[in-house]
Amino acid sequence: MEQARGNDSIWWTACLLYANACLVPLGPALSFVGLLVFFAQGFFLPLTFLTLDVTFQVFNVLLLSGMVGTNSMNLEALQRLAELSGFGLASARVAFPGHISQSATDCVVSFPGKYSDLWDKAVSSVTQQDTFSLACVFLTDTASGLGRHAINPNTPGNCWCRQIYGPAPAATYLSVVQVSADESQNRDQTLTFKRADAEAMGQRLLIKQHQEDIEWEQELAEALQDAEVRCAENQYRAPWGCQWFEEWKQNVDRAAELHQTLHVFYFEDSKGKGKLPWELLANERARHDARKNSGLGASQTAEVAYLDKIGLSYVEHDIMEFAAFLSSRTAAAGS
């Protein structure tokens, strides 16, 4: 209650929840007494008990619905109250391990993650309607594999990171979050995700909020030194790991076994651009040159290079073609 003072909406929400907590044991107790009276009186129940029981139940519903008082209890106030009390109600990001359909004829093996709305549609389509296969993998936390590494069988003792990324710079072990006053609505959720990501990947989390310039520069310098230590301790491997690549590779292998047609989607107006040979993925200069005008995300570059390396053919698409691709596969699945 004390933590909520200063914000009328949050304080009133706390009051309503407190009153509801008091009524929780009282309601069943009154109902139990009424039941005893019912049997003791031989099907005669005093109207007083019935009225009190119903009144408490209705009042409890009104409290939970936020219909009591001048300030309504809404989800935003409830979420903020939970955060003040040390409990998070942030929406969880859903991990996706890929989905290979036994009956599908097509498989999307590379998709630009920055088109998040289209990605959500792709995941929804394959999980709910089984319209096509989706080999792409999205790891969100430690449990799903974020920050984990997988052994590359071609280089025993080493994971895939050395092949697909090369040595990771120390800066990748530093996660900087800048919080401004006008972002207060989504700030807590963003920080929750950033903290979870930093913990999973062994990164140093640095939050820029109200520091003066000198104070911020000192914090940043200290954090960069810490990031260098973390990077060296993890053998200069990518902090996000390469478990995703191993799982993606297994999905692709399965789709190939099922003779599914493979599809790669590029950035808008950049179809076919930014590809690199497998042996040059870890070459910093080659990677930098390819990124200048690339139609592929960083992970996609490794995915397409692997497809070319093992000789798997695929159909290339502009991301703006995805809506038509989705419609045609949905129609085919429904026929």
Image: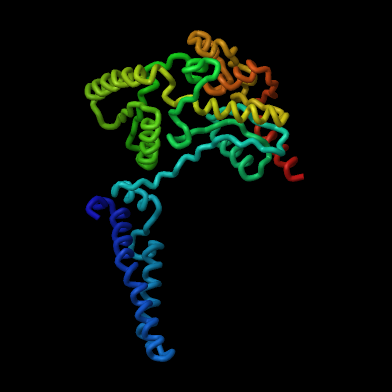
At 32% across and 54% down in the image, what residue appears? 9
Closest to the observer: 85 or 200?
200
Residue at horizontal 50 percent and vertical 20 percent from the top:
160
- Residue ID at (48%, 36%): 144
The correct choice, above or below, for 14 with respect to 34 in the image is above
The image position of residue 287, as x and y in percent, is 52, 12
| 288 displayed left or right of 316 | left
Residue 335 percent across, percent down from the top left: 77, 45
Percent across and percent down for residue 214 are: 22, 21
- Left or right of residue 323: residue 195: left
Q: Residue furthest right?
A: 335
On screen, 116 above or below 164? Answer: below
Q: Residue at x 40, y 44 (%)?
A: 90
Residue at the outermost front position: 156
Q: In the depicted view, which residue is nearer to us: 74 or 44?
A: 44
Name the image quarter holding residue 64. Answer: bottom left
| Type of colouring | rainbow
In the picture provided, is 109 more to the left or to the right than 88?
A: right
Total numbered labels placed on residues in the image:
0
Which residue sits furthest top? Answer: 285
**Residue 292 seen in the current view:** no
Residue 228 at least partly seen: yes
**Can you tell which quarter of the image residue 203 is in?**
top left
Looking at the figure, which quarter contains the N terminus? bottom left
